[in-house]
Amino acid sequence: MKFWRILHLTLMMAVICGCGGRKPSPDPAFQVPVQMIQGVPWVPLAQAMALFGSPMVEGYSGQFHFQQGTLDFKPNHQSFTMVDQKIWMGYACLDWNGSLMVHLRDWEKCLLPLLRMKPMFAAYHSTIVLDPGHGGRDTGAMNASKSLVEKELTLKISRLLQAKLAAKGWLVHLTRESDLTLDLEPRISRVQEFKPDFFISLHVNSAQAKEAVGIETFYTTPQGLPSNLTRNYEDPVEVTFPANQFDDESFQLAWSVQRHLLIATGASDRGVKKARFMGVLRNQSCPAILVETGFLSNPDECQKLASDEYLLQLASGIASAFPDRSNKQSETQ
Ligand SMILES: [Zn+2]
C-alpha cells in the first residue's frame, strides 16, 4: 500500500509539474492537482471537481453540482454533505488563501469513490450475512424504563431484514439465531463459513448525553486516514486489515444503506463514519458495514425503537439498498 501511495503521489506531482514526458492518463483521478502545504498533500477542490465536470457553484467556494447530487463542503469541517447526507472525512477541509482543500487521502478514499460510484452489485453476488450485535450475557445497551435491550432489538431487526432480503432473492444468514453469547472470534469464523458477498452488523446506540440522536453507519477506516471514532482504542493509521481490500465497496455500501435508512425512517443523520477498532468489521473479507440504528438513551428515539413498526422501517430501509435479484437485475446504486 505504501509503495502504491508513493507511486500515486509521484504520478500526480509529475502532472502538476508538467514533467516526465509521460502521456497523461485519461482517468481524471490521476490528473488531480496536489499541493504540498507544510509537507502535507492537499487537493484543491474546485480544480479537482472540475476534472469530473462539476464546476463549483458561483460565489460559493464549497458547493458543487454533480450528477449524483450536490456536494457541500465547509472550511474547517471534517464532514461534508452529498444530497444533504453527511459523510465524515479523515481530515477537516482546509481554507488555503480562499481555496478549499481536502487531504489527498480523503480525495482518494472518500471523494473518488463517490464521484465514480462504480456499480456495487454483480449477478454472481448472492449471499449476505447479518450480524445481530451482542447476545447472551453480552446485552449491549439497555433502556431499563422501556425494558429495551440492544441484543434483542438487533436480533429482531436482523430477522425482519432477513425476510426482506430473502424476498428479493438473496441468501441471508445470521451470525446468531437466538440469544446466544458469541465472542468476536467465533462470530467472525461463523461469518467466514458462509462466504458472504456482503456483511452487515446491526447495533443500537447509547450515550451519556440524552440529546444524542440518529443513525450512523460505519466501515473500516482506509489506510492512511484517522478514524472518526476510536473509543480510546489505538488508531494506527498505516496499518491495513483484511477489510481494507474493500474500502471503496464498503464505503459505497455504507453510503447507500445510510441514505435509504434516512429516507425510510426520517431519523437524524449522524453520517457515514470510519472506525478501525471494530474487530467485527476490519477482519471481514467482503464489503462490510456496521449500522447504529438509533439511541436507546434518547427518549424520543427509544420510544420509536420500542415499536415493531419502526423496526420494520429500519429493516425496509436497509433492504432498499440492495437490488432485487429475483428479477435478475444485476446493478443498482
Ligand atoms: Zn452494540
Image (cartoon, grey):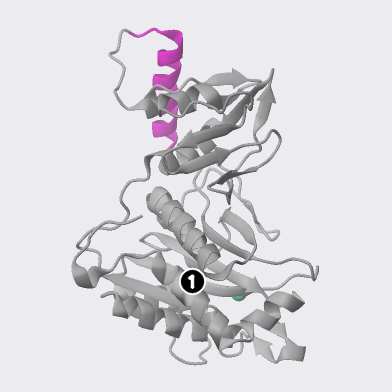
- Camera-nearest residue between 47 and 39: 47
In screen coordinates, is 113 left or right of 236?
left
Q: Amino acid at mark 1?
A: Ser
Quarter of the image where the N terminus is located:
top left
Whether residue 139 is situated above or below residue 123 in the rendered picture: below
Q: Residues within 10 Å of mark 1 (few under 14, many from 20)?
A: many
- Camera-nearest residue between 294 and 199: 294
| Residue 174 image position (x, y, % from top left) | 40, 81
Task: Dividing the image into four quarters, tell me where ligand 1 lies.
Answer: bottom right
Whether residue 163 is situated above or below residue 207 in the rendered picture: below
Q: Is residue 244 visible?
A: no
Whether residue 84 is situated above or below residue 166 in the rendered picture: above
Q: Is residue 309 visible?
A: yes
In screen coordinates, is 139 left or right of 289?
right
Q: Quadrant of residue 210?
A: bottom right
Quarter of the image where the C terminus is located:
bottom left
Q: Which residue is rendered at x = 20% and y = 63% of the image?
A: 124
Q: Quadrant of residue 232?
A: bottom right
